[in-house]
Image (spheres, helix red, strand yellow):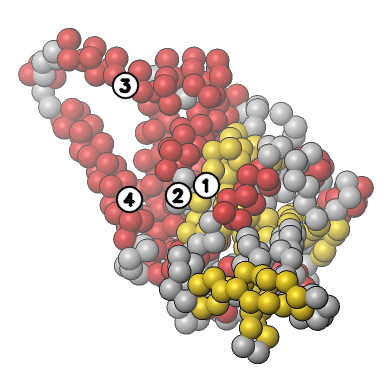
Amino acid sequence: MAYSVTGYAPGDGPSGERPVRYRENLTMPLPAILPYDEPAADWSRPVVLRRGPRFVRRRTEAPRRAKVIVIIPAHNEAQSIGRTLRSLMRQTLPPDEVIVVCDNCTDETAAVSSANGAQVLSTVGNRHKKAGALNQALARILPLISRDDLVLTMDADSQLCRDWLRVASGLLAAYPKVGAVCGVFLGERGSGLIGQLQRNEYVRYARLVGRRNQAPVLSGTGTLFRARALREVARERGSRIPGRPGECYSMSSITEDNEITLALKTIGYKCWSDPRCDTLTEVMPGWRHLFRQRLRWQTGTITDLRVYGFTFVTASYWLKQLFIYAAVAATIASWLIIGLSDRHHIAFNLSWTFAIIGVTLFERLVTVRRAGFRGLLLAVLLVPEFCYDMFKLSFFIRALFDALFKRDVKWNHVVKDDA
């Protein structure tokens, strides 16, 4: 028995094909199903297979759902790893596999991880901290998963909101040119005044990033990668991007998250951030710890840019650094002028002064609404946040000095009591 069927042949139609009609014997066996990893397959419509001079159409196959593999590097994180793993279990799109990479742990991190349903992988001879732990895990995992699978790397002291994986994986499925998606991070409770200052800062940063969706840095608190993007980064190390061939994360960078962002963008991928992907992360408990954290971030940023040089990708990053240090120089110059001027010759226009204060107060309140009552109260006072901005000048200046003279920045993780 024959039946008339409409198929597709190469042509100049809207999808590069033209419809053709032919008669096909339904008793004739159809060709074997193509493997899912076939790059030419388009699963959004019937697949066209060629048999001799004819074209046959078979039933559309549902696409295979990409697996989500979670990798959590952890060094003595017994106090926080349980909360992190429970946040993954509560996801509306549960991960397929969760692996905790115990890196030179001397506490109960492995036991707590196993008790919460995670697999435990211990590093061997790792001297490169987080980047080295991630590379050892990825070297074992990437060869075993499909190129279309997804890999989430996250800190052991971070907790994801319930829809984090669903939203991030949906963005990667919808936009093939996006290589990785991260969320916006918010500060955990506790640590008094310094903790609230950091929470206000994180809320403002999240608001700024969320309005553009472009991720200037893929946050270490949680980033979802395409497996094929990580493989390409490892393959291009030493040629198109700096680093040793075969490593996904650069072990020579002290800010591995910033460096892998530059690596992905250099090989042609986009990096996105979505405000719906909230991540709760730690805040530094003291000024000394905060200074060392920010010094590491800023020094690493400058060092990574110096390694990559001035390119089309890094141009905006260099421009941002230029604006930062121009603002630092302008602030210092303003205070010097005020301090060295004869105070009897300085006249203040009260109306202009109050107008400037009013605009500043309005901006500080609007941008920190998400921080709650305590954040708003701190913003109203103005003086604490002004002093915090002055504190930032110290590590910006020190970071520039360290980067210019290539001084190492030491970093020790801070273990805190529950807030």
Q: Which residue is mark 2?
A: 214
The answer to whether 94 appears left or right of 38 in the picture is right
- Front residue of 80/337: it is 80
N-terminal of the two: label 1 or label 3?
A: 1
SS type, badge 4: helix
Q: Which residue is mark 1?
A: 273
- Front residue of 149/7: it is 7
Q: Residue at x 42, y 19 (%)?
A: 365
The answer to whether 385 appears left or right of 151 in the picture is left
SS type, badge 2: loop
- Which amino acid, by three-letter code, is at mark 2? Gln
How far from the left and from the top, in percent, is residue 28?
A: 81, 81
N-terminal of the two: label 2 or label 4?
A: 2
For label 1, count other residues whose C-alpha is less than 10 Å away and answer few (under 14), some (14-19) or many (20+). Answer: many
The answer to whether residue 393 is above or below residue 408 is above
How far from the left and from the top, in percent, is residue 136?
A: 72, 70
N-terminal of the two: label 3 or label 2?
A: 2
- Which amino acid, by three-letter code, is at mark 4? Lys
Q: Looking at the image, which residue sits at the far left?
A: 345
- Camera-near label (4 vs 1) is 1
- Front residue of 236/44: it is 44
- Front residue of 301/266: it is 266
- Which amino acid, by three-letter code, is at mark 1? Ser
Q: Which residue is mark 3?
A: 360
Q: Looking at the image, which residue sits at the far top?
A: 350
Q: Which residue is mark 4?
A: 320
N-terminal of the two: label 4 or label 1?
A: 1
Evaluate if marks 1 and 2 touch, with contact meaning CB atoms under 8 Å apart.
yes
Between the residue at mark 2 and the residue at mark 4, the CA separation in whole angstroms equals 15 Å
The answer to whether residue 171 is above or below residue 227 is above
Between the residue at mark 3 and the residue at mark 2, the CA separation in whole angstroms equals 26 Å
